[in-house]
Amino acid sequence: MGSSIVDSVKLTVQIRLLPDATAQLALGQTLKLANQAANLVSDVAWQRRVFRAYSLQKLTYSQVRSLGLSAQSAVRVIKKVADAYTPNRRTKRRFRSDAAQPYDDRCLSWQPDQGTVSIWTIAGRFKGMPFVAGDYQRKLLAYRKGESDLLCRDGRWYLFATCEVPEPTPITPAGFLGVDLGIVNIASTSDGDRHAGKHLNRVRHRNQRLRGKLQKKGTKSAKRLLKRRRRKEARFAADTNHVISKRIVAEAERTGRGIALEDLQGIRGRVRLRKPQRATLHSWAFHQFGRFIGYKARRAGVVVVLVDPSYTSQACSACGHVDRANRQGQADFSCRSCGFAGHADWNAARNIAERGGAGWAASTSRTRTGALSPELQARPRPTVDDSARQTIGHGH
Ligand SMILES: [Zn+2]
């Protein structure tokens, strides 16, 4: 399809830093001071009702500098505060002592070939600080644009770099790979591949039990532990989603097909669950999966179509007969009308693939020239956070 939409995807690439003990201390003190300064600027902004970066800078710059921040960091701090007030000015903004601090090219430089950065701290500039990045992340770093955020999570140091990656033009698909999302199997394809989430579900159950215990305790250390657990689980879920979505996109790309997914908004309503299962159905994990598929597909030039999710599990993918009794259990599908039988998730994925093809045909026939208009390029709807940003962690 002769579509010539020049577009780019904004990605946040997460890079882990490996500072030595001295550098860690310096980074920690820098964040602390930067956020102390941010709170001071926020006080002024709130009291004087001045929220624009330029005006705030006139009011607070010298004071912030006198705390020990460099000229550039002082400007970044003031801008951070101004940005924090952009959504609304109804509540006073406070910054935690470990809140992320933006760095621009003057306080931070990258040496991707050496795998190092040179970064300003209040204890001086640290040169040759190593970072870890996979090949893919390194490639993305070539598109780095603007600021990076420095932050510390669970004792690990990271830079979140903003990258603007140009998008390839979508390739006209030769059929669709249908993907059914579920709980027992995180994703099942119309080709019959099932990506199980056994390990992930185990981690979740274990954490859930632990959570119950710790919540009862309610102590400070219990809360801290809970928080750490939650983050770890989220990281694990994201890793799983990355791995599976990557495989699916690679398979679609290899076979020249598009990807059909259920409209994610429909997932919650469709799946009826007993109570213990409900906790495992973190809708954000499904949304995240959809987003991962979405941006990985866009980068690969693979079309993604969202389809109506109704009856995908009850309809027969061979003859179209819809009957609740077709589905005989969690895993088994057996058509009452034609006798077609198979794994229930596979049957659903086949239905999704077919709807994807039908949806695609309908959308392309509506355009006279045959070129896709932007709104017809089925893209995942904005989901949990409706920004177009994705975070790329190590090894994805
Ligand atoms: Zn049938």
Image (cartoon, helix red, strand yellow):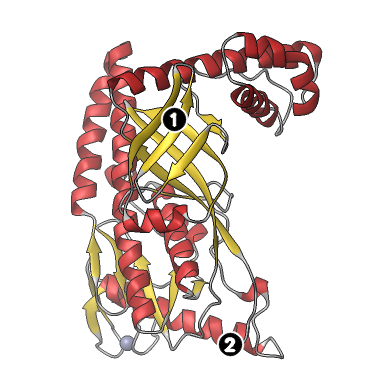
Ligand 1 resides in the quarter of the picture at bottom left
How packed mark 1 is, by other alpha carbons closer than 10 Å (few <14, some 14-19, many 20 or more), is: many
Q: Nearer the viewer, residue 328 or 245?
A: 245
Q: Nearer the viewer, residue 297 or 88?
A: 297
Residue of label 1? 151
Whole-angstrom CA distance, mark 2 to mark 1, is: 43 Å
Q: Which percent across, then down, holds residue 354?
A: 43, 83
Point out the tag, 2 or 1, that comes first from the N-terminus: 2
The quarter of the picture where the N terminus appears is bottom right
Type of amino acid at the residue the image marks with label 1: Leu
Q: Taking 220 as reference, is 176 left or right?
A: right
Residue of label 2? 1
Q: Which percent across, then down, holds residue 302?
A: 46, 75
Q: Taking 77 as reference, is 175 left or right?
A: left
**Residue in the picture at 52% in, 14% down:** 33
Q: Which percent across, then down, holds residue 378?
A: 57, 72
Q: Are marks 2 and 1 in contact (CB under 8 Å)?
A: no
